[in-house]
Image (spheres, coloured by chain):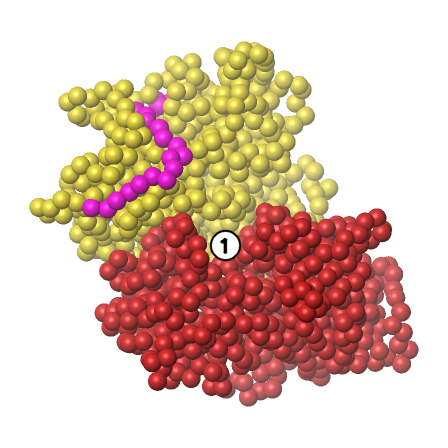
Chain colours: A red, B yellow
């Protein structure tokens, strides 16, 4: 891949904001040749997007980028406070607080991390540099064509130019990605329209600064309504606080999308709103006024060669702090699909799943934004409702409309609620894979949803491991063999391992050409970059003996053999908590296939004979470039 | 302090190994002027000390240095495996494994982190640089004098020289510290003898390298005995493994302390010992042979101006991985005492506690080393004994000598077992503070031992906080006001806060001269560098209202107001887990004074009236430079 001739790239990425950086960081790690440009002379110096949601923290952790980010000491939001005017009085009082990621969500990091976008960009830029990619700045895109007929390998031609016109380049690429933000040149050139779900537009003022105040919740995320207006407070790194204030709305009679306000005017408003509390600014680090409307791009791609993502595809109010998180997920969704096509694993058709999967998330985000805002503007929730909503166990609470919406919204904003519908990647009864072993009764894993978090013990070194982070974001499917009780599953496991090695299996079909020269230190991809295997026994660590218990090719993944022997508060009486959390039989186990981006592909039973391996062949065969499966066995 | 004239320093530190670096890092953060030299041209490039024990991880975390260290991806040892020859057969078999920091120890990080000393040094050197201190290399000490009569402020004169004799300097300092390792020039010059507790000496070979092997426990810490000799295996960062092998012992008839072995000979031995498993080296990164005997320096200081620490004071077998950890604790023990003397808080006499506190730990280490080794050489422990030893609750297990020794040893090697005896800093019935409120019945905190770890919720931002890390290692006493149920303790808390402000209280006596100009962002030391206050309510976070519940000066520590509302597995039925873990009444609370290095000074009841504040005045008055306490109140 990296051996392409000069001027030829696997991908040209335009825009080095969150979506572009996540995409290029992922692809650079997997060895692709990247041209990445941005029209700004340097990374974001202050302000802009800043909220990293729980699920995004998981993703960053999985990429080894959470620690470098935490070095900057982001503020952590665990709770949100609501302030409203008291009855028949001036001023504001706290009417409630609640967890931003309540306990019913099994989040590894149940908080939002707040830090300015430039810091986040830096973490990616450093990682890119280690993989030999430098952002070319300040450069812009002047035009492009995409024509697979004239050049089937590098169908995209892209014209780039220094923003001052000092230099020009024309390059060819397999893909072009537009991550240029709301005013995307690439989207415009493609003639793709932006559809506005809610016609109401707003002008927002946003200010980052250091304040002195006696307002008690200045270090919490707050939504404040007063007789003098509304404001949102978000704590930040370095003693800073961010203020969002609505300056104008198209729902007002004197609506003017060009309406603006000075920093001093916003400060004066904030002072009035916060009364009886005082607030003074020691410094203002960033201040911006911008009009924003909800919008979704009609298409994310026209030809599966030129793609859009991030703000180029969806814009919405900054209040839910979803912009960057949605951008991240756009990027990882696209990255692994490109990877699997370019590796020759998957048919080019899987790229058709990018737009519907990500567009549906954007639509859910926008309608959630509306619905939630309305519910809040109607009435103040009662303390009892909040408590009901936060509880893990009480399902009857869902009858209350407010509680239901609250729960959905928490799940959604945390990132754990993202759900991809049935398609060739996310199994459902309409999937071509028809094995009756698929989706056994009892499983709590839902296809198209994230895997459930669980702790396990690694056998070789007794380290406690987050199973969901065991395999890094390496572009591979993760095949988790929950092996139950080894005395019960011994034969099934041996049969499964043996069937994997059949001539027409997905395992054999996509083995690495360089397998013989792979170092014995390779942990994740000794056989193929398509998959990584993990085997998890419902045993105590010291009772697992790899050489005895792990058959055939599975034993090669010695760093991914685990004991399911960690106690978990959510399933306190389970003998094997990870099995129990996934809803798999603690004796019989089961096999779970996870997409490279962490979403569940399918779950099957682990049975004696070839059935389990057959089910996996059926699944992968639905989108693989080769025909898979032992035909006789399927009859 | 930093305004001393040229050539004058607060301290000259010789040696930039773990002890010297920890001392200078601590003092540099607190603003002292430091001359720090090392005779090596650069930090340790490979090998040497590498084991960071659980308690040291706590300390590094408390200093904000754990994350930079973890960036290097140290190996983590959670379990230790024992291998022995099978009965009447050749080869080796695993006879048991156990946790290196078992569950009965309430450790935050229940593992040992393994990484080569150079990485660790780098982390400190980077931190020092941020505080304006550069190690002067390669320089050595040529001589020194200490004479308080000729110069009471800077009594120590030190002559330094470039190792190649290229340059010379003579400087004056308040203190001189020798952290030069086992062959300490400063110790020799002082004429301090090293006493050998156990006359047996050993020659060790140690090898770091990358291997290929089918030995299943190569990623665990292993003690292997075979008919061909013994070996110890320790996993390392970057796929490395360390091998310790005993080359000679003075207990052997042909003992020769100069006996050596080549790397090839050690590898050949290892191959024999590991049979029937194979082992091949892909690379050897470090190899060293060194003779070592157990020894303790007779004195750690003669005049409380020139001090010794680390290997200059104690040498022992590398097997227990205690060298660097003991060095760290020598340094922090001394650092805060120098700080409190130099700040004018404490009488110079507290420096008398450095030697007995740290020397006793070294002696415990050495006798533990012997006792434990003997117990193991006698017989192989039974699986049942190991299980008994690992359990939290079963006290009867202590009757078994093996189990008792094992438990003690785990506690000791984890660092959680370090215990300082009664003295002016660690309260006991013989302490000058005689208040009957001290050491209330039920408390689980032991003076001279570490505070117990606990999670709490910070009130201002709802962040979950490790209480033991709430206050960084800032040189201050931590005064933890466990405030119980606010409806019950309201008056006691108000009385306590009021009594703190009395004219002759420790609180008032040592207020900062620059208090009026301290920024409102200051979290830890708004009033004084002597102390930081934390207030912990046995309430839910949302029920605490700082302005209503936290009286007087305590409210100024708004970033250290906590709610004890986190569930803890170790006290599952407690309403207020932190109170319960400390053994404090969940209704009535209590006040805990923690030394700057994390050890418990004393515990008192929280009562109405001035009693609680009086008890603290009595405690601090025992070593303060000013007379403390309201005489009338004490009558």
* Percent coordinates x, y for residue A395 in the rendering: 49, 84
Q: Residues within 10 Å of mark 1 (few under 14, many from 20)?
A: some
Label 1: element kind: strand
Residue at figure coordinates x 67%, y 69% from the top left: A148
Residue at figure coordinates x 87%, y 64% from the top left: A261
Q: Is residue A596 left or right of residue B1?
A: left
Residue with the mark numbered 1: B466
* Percent coordinates x, y for residue A253 in the rendering: 89, 81
* Percent coordinates x, y for residue A114 in the rendering: 65, 59
Magenta residues span B276-299
Nearer to me, A133 or A296: A133
Residue at figure coordinates x 47%, y 47% from the top left: B73
Q: Quadrant for residue A156, please give it.
A: bottom right
Classified by dominant secondary structure, the portion drawn in magenta counts as: strand
A101 w.r.t. B129: above or below: below
Residue A326 showing in the rendered view: no
């Amino acid at each position: 891949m990296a051996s392409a001739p000069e001027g030829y790239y696997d991908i040209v990425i335009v825009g080095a904001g969150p979506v572009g950086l996540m995409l290029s960081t992922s692809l650079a790690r997997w060895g692709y040749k990247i041209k990445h440009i941005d029209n700004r002379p340097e990374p974001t110096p202050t302000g802009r997007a800043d909220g990293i949601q729980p699920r995004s923290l998981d993703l960053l952790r999985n990429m080894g980028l959470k620690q470098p980010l935490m070095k900057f000491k982001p503020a952590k939001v665990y709770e949100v406070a609501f302030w409203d005017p008291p009855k028949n009085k001036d001023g504001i009082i706290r009417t409630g607080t609640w967890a931003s990621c309540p306990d019913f969500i099994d989040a590894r990091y149940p908080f939002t991390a707040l830090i300015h976008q430039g810091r986040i960009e830096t973490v990616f830029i450093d990682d890119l540099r280690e993989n030999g990619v430098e952002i070319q700045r300040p450069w812009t895109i002047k035009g492009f064509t995409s024509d697979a007929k004239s050049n089937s390998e590098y169908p995209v031609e892209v014209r780039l130019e220094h923003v001052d016109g000092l230099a020009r380049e024309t390059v060819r690429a397999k893909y072009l990605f537009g991550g240029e933000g709301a005013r995307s040149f690439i989207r415009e050139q493609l003639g793709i329209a932006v559809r506005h779900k809610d016609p109401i537009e707003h002008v927002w003022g946003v200010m980052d600064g250091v304040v002195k105040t006696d307002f008690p919740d200045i270090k919490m995320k707050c939504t404040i309504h007063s007789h003098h207006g509304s404001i949102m407070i978000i704590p930040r790194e370095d003693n800073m606080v961010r203020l969002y204030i609505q300056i104008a709305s198209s729902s007002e009679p004197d609506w003017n999308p060009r309406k603006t306000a000075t920093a001093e005017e916003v400060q004066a408003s904030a002072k009035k709103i916060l009364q009886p509390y005082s607030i003074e600014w020691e410094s203002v680090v960033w201040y911006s006024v911008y009009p924003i409307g909800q919008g979704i791009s009609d298409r994310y791609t026209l030809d599966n060669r030129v793609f859009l993502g991030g703000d180029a595809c969806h814009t919405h109010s900054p209040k839910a702090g979803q912009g960057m998180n949605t951008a991240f997920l756009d990027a990882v969704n696209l990255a692994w699909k490109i990877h699997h096509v370019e590796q020759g694993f998957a048919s080019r058709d899987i790229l058709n799943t990018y737009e519907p999967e990500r567009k549906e998330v954007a639509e859910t985000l926008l309608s959630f934004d509306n619905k939630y805002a309305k519910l809040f503007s109607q009435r103040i929730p009662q303390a009892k409702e909040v408590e009901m909503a936060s509880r893990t166990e009480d399902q009857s609470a869902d009858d209350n409309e407010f509680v239901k919406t609250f729960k959905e919204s928490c799940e959604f904003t945390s990132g754990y609620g993202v759900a991809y519908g049935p398609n060739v990647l996310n199994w459902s009864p309409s999937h071509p894979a028809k094995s009756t072993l698929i989706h056994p009764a009892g499983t709590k894993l839902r296809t198209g949803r994230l895997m459930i978090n669980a702790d396990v013990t690694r056998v070789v070194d007794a380290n406690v491991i987050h199973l969901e982070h065991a395999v890094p974001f390496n572009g591979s499917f993760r095949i988790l063999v929950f092996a139950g009780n080894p005395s019960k599953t011994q034969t099934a496991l041996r049969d499964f391992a043996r069937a994997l090695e059949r001539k027409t299996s997905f395992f054999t079909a996509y083995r690495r050409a360089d397998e013989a020269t792979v170092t014995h230190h390779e942990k994740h991809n000794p056989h193929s970059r398509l998959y990584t295997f993990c085997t998890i026994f419902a045993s105590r660590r010291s009772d697992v003996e790899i050489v005895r218990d792990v058959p055939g090719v599975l034993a090669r993944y010695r760093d991914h053999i685990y004991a399911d022997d960690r106690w978990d508060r959510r399933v306190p009486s389970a003998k094997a908590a990870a099995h129990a959390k996934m809803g798999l039989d603690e004796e019989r186990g089961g096999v779970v296939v996870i997409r490279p981006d962490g979403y569940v592909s399918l779950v099957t039973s682990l049975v004696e004979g070839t059935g389990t391996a057959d089910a996996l062949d059926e699944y992968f065969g639905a989108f693989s470039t080769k025909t898979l499966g032992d035909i006789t066995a399927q009859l």
